[in-house]
Image (tube, coloured by chain):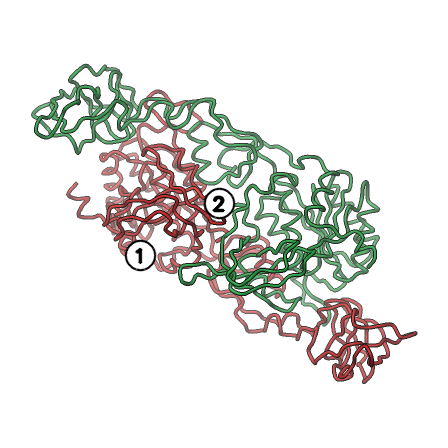
Chain colours: A red, B green
Amino acid sequence: MGEELFNVLTVQEAREKMASCLPADLRRITRKSLLDCLGMRLAHPVVAREDVPGFMRSTVDGYAVRAEDTFGASEGLPAFFTVTGEVRPGVAPERVIAPGEAMRVATGAMLPPGADAAVMVEYTEEAGEGCIEVLRPVGPGENILRPDEDIKAGEEVFPGNHLLRPQDIGYLASIGEVELDVFAPLRVGIISTGDELVPPEEKPRPGEVRDINSYTLYSMVRALGGAPVLYGVVRDDTGLLENRLREACRETDLVVISGGSSVGTRDHTAGCIAALGEPGLIFHGLAVRPGKPTLGGVVDGKPVFGLPGHPAAALISFDLLVSPLLKFGGYHSLSEGASPVKAVLARSLGSAPGREEYFRVKLRRDQGRIWADPILGKSGLLTPMVEADGIVRIPLESEGLAQEAEVDVYLFGTDYVL
Amino acid sequence: MGEELFNVLTVQEAREKMASCLPADLRRITRKSLLDCLGMRLAHPVVAREDVPGFMRSTVDGYAVRAEDTFGASEGLPAFFTVTGEVRPGVAPERVIAPGEAMRVATGAMLPPGADAAVMVEYTEEAGEGCIEVLRPVGPGENILRPDEDIKAGEEVFPGNHLLRPQDIGYLASIGEVELDVFAPLRVGIISTGDELVPPEEKPRPGEVRDINSYTLYSMVRALGGAPVLYGVVRDDTGLLENRLREACRETDLVVISGGSSVGTRDHTAGCIAALGEPGLIFHGLAVRPGKPTLGGVVDGKPVFGLPGHPAAALISFDLLVSPLLKFGGYHSLSEGASPVKAVLARSLGSAPGREEYFRVKLRRDQGRIWADPILGKSGLLTPMVEADGIVRIPLESEGLAQEAEVDVYLFGTDYVL
């Protein structure tokens, strides 16, 4: 216990200590076809190579004109135009608009040379064969887009590490970026330890339980854009664990070992991390509840984490320490990308100062507000983990939160969208 | 124009009219391995076949005892126990706890027969070889989980159509559900129309623009768990469009045609939908802005939508009419699964009664509130689509929203998480 007290770090300290032993970014860069980039992160900023729309374009169905020819037009005294033709979609009109002339344009059509505005069809009237009357004036530039009004060549359209959403994929198509450098998914090795664990397809005998963490962590890694690799259940044996850990370290970019709710197993795990390579074990215990029995180490430039055995605690430790690596390749930029749901706490929550505390909450809408109902269950239960919509954090120095306090609710594994 | 006025429906009317011509659920059911079910929806409710944990389990590191033997214990007058051994993880202890006896247990270990509580190690003291003193009483059931306390056999753990999140995958592992019936991804055929469109890998000539909607809609379908199939760009030609649409209807479950910002193209699309099968065109225009030039039809039991050509409008029409089909297989259960972000409107927004209006907003945190800044740009611009975090809806009957009004912000394509 003395050793643990000595090495218990705050989350911030643990991240900083790990970061000092890791490369600045764990991720490799890979080139992908645009359609395969959804949910991936850009390796570099994207700079537009062309203007969009690239030509003068009408934003209305109507007539391309020289704006000055409409000045003073009104319903009582309309301006008279000769219609010299129609601009077909996708075609560059060659005929110049001379004074008093108009060409019919649909939304999106290119303006003919000489025109500098478009009149909406609603403000025109047919005036005999090939002629219209315009009932309202338009200013230069009205109802049109300039060639670089949407996107300018040379402009940075997305910063590096931007997470690509559906609308971004379309946007990149518009500037012809059909192949992109993105970060390759981090390969995450997942090991479960514990003599009591059996694979989920087996029926546990009394005293045994199914391996849950491999399945939760596999899914969390996938949800965050990583590539999970399962290394199965390892019994409580230092030799076996060391071999499995060595294999995982060789084949993946990052390893999580969960389990070891008993002190003995935890010591096995700590010993294996320390034995495997330099610098070895970095911290042993986190000032967080749940999540205290979390270990962190670095083996030859690869992070290795020992997560608590309890599924809910493992999930929280994972979110605090592993998610940032999947999102950002390191512990920089942590404030980016977090977009919690704002809610009102439905009852007060007490907390001991000196550690961060995380409570699971369910969101409920009532009287025009979003309420966060804490889900308080016996420790050891799984059900609260699936009843919860997210977690609320009580900071290190706080003694708790009052009823009706405004809280930020973080949803598990929500990186894809937020 | 007269025809359009006649057929313009509200979103609710359009959904109901479509639903009346469609099967109750468009989705097929498929059986998948649990690890492949992340982000999919359950075809049926899941009922637990076993109790969890399935045996009496300690939730603390300490000693299994008969609670009554601790009654009256205190620091001044501790209760004395003989320690008869240790319960090893994963092993069912056979030795019965007799009065005055205790066995060492780790968190998660099975209680030996006779024991009905666990004492935390912190409230015990070593008292010579094989003996401990207990300094506080425990009640029956204290610090333990009953065999069915977490999950009861026969209990419904998830309803049908539940979207499987990472923690749900772990939960299903705990009850041995390693294969599940889920809804197969809906195959969505995507067609773009317009003489002005070129594929994104081509450099557009003056007057031409790149096909954006195929890319945005492909990504939206993927983000919502569907299986997109691209059918490319079709020029403004009824015969060509009819052939492509027939092919898409044969090969997929649902077809979206985007484009046709000009009235002529829209009429092509409407004509093709009407010509292809029964009942054909269902509605022609939506009381929504942007998104008015939206068409809907049913061809031999398959929905076909004509979406507006403008990318932002196409995205909104898609979210209103296609997203529900991907999420629920039909237009039932629409209130489920929507979990918008609550924000405060940073400026007032006007709207014409008689149509729903959607505004793009960017979220910003300031003074402890989340503000929704409307992004107002010229119609026709793409940039606001990627600057926005989501959209705010102004209902049919409303004339607008005041500054500082509380609004629900819906994020595009966020089904996976919310």
Q: What label sits on residue A255 in the rendered view? A: none
The residue beneath circle 2 is A365
Residue contact at pointers 2 and 1, CB within 8 angstroms: no
Q: Residues within 10 Å of mark 1 (few under 14, many from 20)?
A: some
Residue A412 image offset from top left, x and y in percent: 43, 45
Specify whether disc 2 shares its chain with disc 1. Answer: yes
Amino acid type at circle 2 is Arg
Mark 2: which secondary structure? strand
User: In 3D space, how far apart are the residues under numbered discs 2 and 1 (Cα atoms)?
Assistant: 40 Å
The residue beneath circle 1 is A19
Q: How many numbered markers are drawn?
A: 2
Q: Is residue A336 left or right of residue A398?
A: right
Q: In this view, does A404 lie to the left or right of A271?
A: right
Can the viewer see residue B138 in this picture? yes
Chain for disc number 2: A
Earlier residue among tags 2 and 1 = 1
Can the viewer see residue B214 in this picture? no
Q: Which of A137 and A25 is in front in this view?
A: A137
Screen quadrant of the N terminus of chain B:
bottom right
- Using the image, determine if residue B176 lies above or below residue A312: above
- Using the image, determine if residue B51 lies above or below residue A417: above
Q: Nearer the viewer, residue A193 or B320?
A: B320
Q: Image point 57% across, 48% down: which residue?
A: B223
Task: Classify residue B263 by image quadrant.
Answer: bottom right
Residue A232 image offset from top left, x and y in percent: 39, 34
Q: Which of B373 and A248 is in front in this view?
A: B373
Mark 1: which secondary structure? helix
Task: Classify residue B103 by image quadrant.
Answer: top left
Residue B49 image offset from top left, x and y in percent: 47, 22
Residue B198 image offset from top left, x and y in percent: 71, 62
Amino acid type at circle 1 is Ala
